[in-house]
Amino acid sequence: MLIIFKCSLIFMLSLLLSILISKYYSRDTSPVISLREGDLLAVQASHILPVPRLGGLAIFVGFVVSAFFAPQSIEYEVQLIMLAATPLFVAGLLEDIGYHITPKGRLLAAIFSSLLTAIFLGFWLPRFGFPAIDYYFSFAIIGIPITLLVCSALSNAVNLIDGVNGLAESSSAVSFLGFMLISYHAGQLELMIVAAMILAAILGFLALNFPRGLIFLGDAGSYVLGHLIAWIGILIMVRIDNISPWTVLLCAFWPAADTLLSIFRRVWAKVPMMSADREHFHHVIMDFLNKIPAFSGNINITNPLSTLVQLPFMIFPAAIGIYYYESPIQSFAYFVIFMFLYVTAYYSLKNIYKKLY
């Protein structure tokens, strides 16, 4: 019953802070820290009105409270993860309130926060999932750089899919729900409770973000969400010896797949890696939905609807990962299969759209 009370309290805190921010920091009362008019002209924009971008503040407070409500046996580690996330949160928040922090600057902040986390906790990504390679992960000179690469990539990945209402939040919710179920099956109830409280903070914010988009995560929220997915996932791997790292990645499949495909697209097209575009999977889905006569290109409908269309494809890889959480070969094979299907579906939809429209 205590965990239900804690989760309910965190949910309400995140919800109430989101309501206050959405009401107080409107485009009329505080245009500097709402989504700026210029943002609507950005190539990747999927909205038509300025919206408060300080949702990251609401959800971050929920995460901090979760850290202090964590079970005693794991409380210290979760608090250190949140403390180390602070530089990344600040960098994102500065961008959200109008200071121009370049994508490279935010990426460096993500790397720095992950480095701090590894130093504070004294551990890093413990294995790759294959014994012949896992041995080398025990060496800091190998394990830490790979960990920084993976964790900063996941931070950036959640930011990349934060383009339509509810997408980044629902994908992250799937990740932490997966972490809850894995921890429960492995008998790690402390980890399950932590994942449940973080999930509650996400859902409290999601109530304002989806479907109407009354408030946005902003860079502060999306980058920290990715950081938490990465490091709670690593904490689970450290605490549960037999869990496959590919299971953790399957729980975060949608942002991971989008990022891998984005890297491939930009390398192939020989464009800057940090350049913005409107070529993500959610943009392709929205383009199709906007052509359906019943919707008449109404972004207020097609924007949240695109998240609902993608939701089953976030859940299914996570479900497979949970089922095979003790099997690194099977979970790796399924990750490769889902990645192949993702890329195939993406380019097939792009080609169909070009032929039809």
Image (tube, helix red, strand yellow):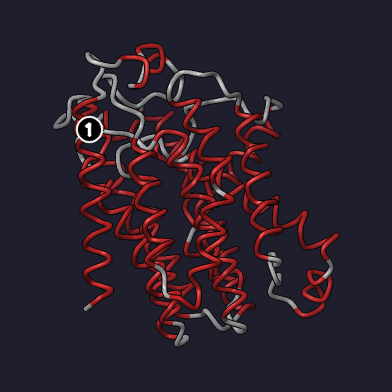
10 Å crowding of disc 1: few (<14), some (14-19), many (20+) = many
Locate residue 11: give its quadrant. Answer: bottom left
Left or right, 257 with reference to 199: right
In this view, the residue in front, 167 or 305, is 167
**Which residue is painted at 51% across and 40% down in the image?**
89
Q: Position of residue 218 (x, y in %)?
A: 41, 33
Provide the residue designation for mark 1: 214
Left or right, 308 with reference to 240: left
In this view, the residue in front, 153 or 300, is 153
In this view, the residue in front, 328 or 52, is 52
Up/down of 350 relative to 70, above or below: above
- The quarter of the rendered structure image containing the N terminus is bottom left
Secondary structure beneath dot 1 equals loop
Locate residue 287: give its quadrant. Answer: top left
Up/down of 125 relative to 92, above or below: below
| Residue type for callout 1 | Leu
Left or right, 247 with reference to 54: right
